[in-house]
Image (cartoon, helix red, strand yellow):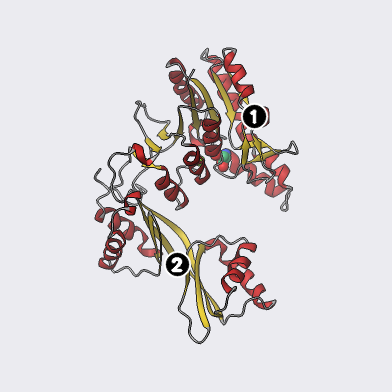
Amino acid sequence: MPILVMKFGGTSVATLDRIRRAAKRVGVEVAKGYDVIVIVSAMSGKTNELVGWVGETSPLYDAREYDAVVSSGENVTAGLMALTLQEMDVPARSWQGWQVPVQTTSAHSAARIEDIPPQNINAKFAEGMKVAVVAGFQGVSPEGRITTLGRGGSDTTAVAFAAAFEAERCDIYTDVDGVYTTDPRVSAKARKLDKIAFEEMLELASLGAKVLQTRSVELAMRYKVKLRVLSSFEEQSDDAGTLVCDEEEIMESNVVAGVAFSRDEAKMTLVSVADRPGIAAAIFGALSDGGVNVDMIVQNISEEGRTDMTWSCPVDQVARAEKAMAEAKADGTINFHDLIADKDVAKVSVVGIGMRSHTGVAAKMFDVLSNEGINIQVITTSEIKISVLINRKYMELAVQALHDAFELDKAA
Ligand code: ASP
Ligand code: MG
């Protein structure tokens, strides 16, 4: 039998009614002849509640017990989904991560999946089971302890199962009906994409489009798992939602696929550091040790052997960065005059694989921003992305203007 993976996110299993609705969709696919692996998240809000309980009980908690607690939300939905399917006369059973087993590293709360041996589940399919309901987000470490994969990890569970079982497709049911050219709350002209290439989705996911966990897209790209994002709240046809796929499967696409943004950025500048070999390693090593996720980096031209180093990072990590730099200054690793933090910036990016073969995208982007009177503070580019840092109060305006200028409301 062909295998289909169907993943239901927290809002899609938030109540018993919604679990029934999701189970009906599973029933439709079983009726088409699929063996189905259903991956479930915890009911929406549940994981946050569990995380809160852990913090309240033990501020400096043991990460192994954190995982034991926060993984439990998925166990509840897996059992309830299996029961609901059984009530519909669909042969189903639930599996917790360790039962499959989903073998992960020991990095508690941020474990990576190492292997998913398919034998146990396949044996049950061979006996007539039609649906394996698997608790997402969790696995088991080599030490035999329960692990979790990081917030949003059920997406990664779903893709990993699709790869391990060579599923025909991995359908991610969520509360939006697909991937949009930009956030519809920011531009009313945002358009749902029928297809998007893995690499574009990867950029959009890591730039803050919250539909899929970034790691799940990386995994899908590596194993060429066809991913479909669709809504569990609408009646679905076979081509509903957005297909995330290999670029070869996309015949025509716009040069720019989407405009992404991330609101809560900060820009930090280390003023007057010695320009010598090893200085960047010292600065960014200290930031990384201090738990700061640096994004963009700019080094100025130096004058008389000294230069300025600018980077961006999430705004809530500014204090950490300040601490790391103060410590590095105190112990003599880095010498600088000042550290300036601008907490009022946002990042806006245009993404599209078409940029590989089309010139002028950057020039057009800068032109659009200049026509709106928006000053660009930092620019970074990759093969398929251009990002700028601007004052946060212009973020919506920039997104709308770019969406208009690149005509993203129209299909290619
Ligand atoms: N329940 C977990 C979370 O809220 C995992 C997931 O839903 O993907 O992060
Ligand atoms: Mg999610």
Q: Is residue 280 left or right of residue 30?
A: right
**Mark 1 Cα-neighbour bin, 10 Å: few <14, some 14–19, many ≥20:** many
Write down the residue under mark 2: 344
Tell which circle, 1 or 2, labels the residue nearer the N-terminal end.
1
Residue at point 64% right, 44% down? 111
Q: Could you tell me residue 350's position as x and y percent?
A: 35, 55
Q: Quadrant of ligand 1?
A: top right
Q: Is residue 171 left or right of residue 49?
A: left
Q: Is residue 340 visible?
A: yes
**Mark 2 Cα-neighbour bin, 10 Å: few <14, some 14–19, many ≥20:** some
Instruction: Identify which residue, 164 or 132, lies in the foreground.
Output: 164
3D distance between C-alphas at marks 1 and 2: 44 Å
The yes-or-no answer for disc 1 within 8 Å of ligand 1 is: no
Instruction: Residue 96: give its label.
Output: 1
**Residue 237: quarter of image:** top left
Quadrant position of the C terminus in the picture = top left
The three-letter code of the residue at mark 1 reads Gln
319 relative to 129, above or below: below
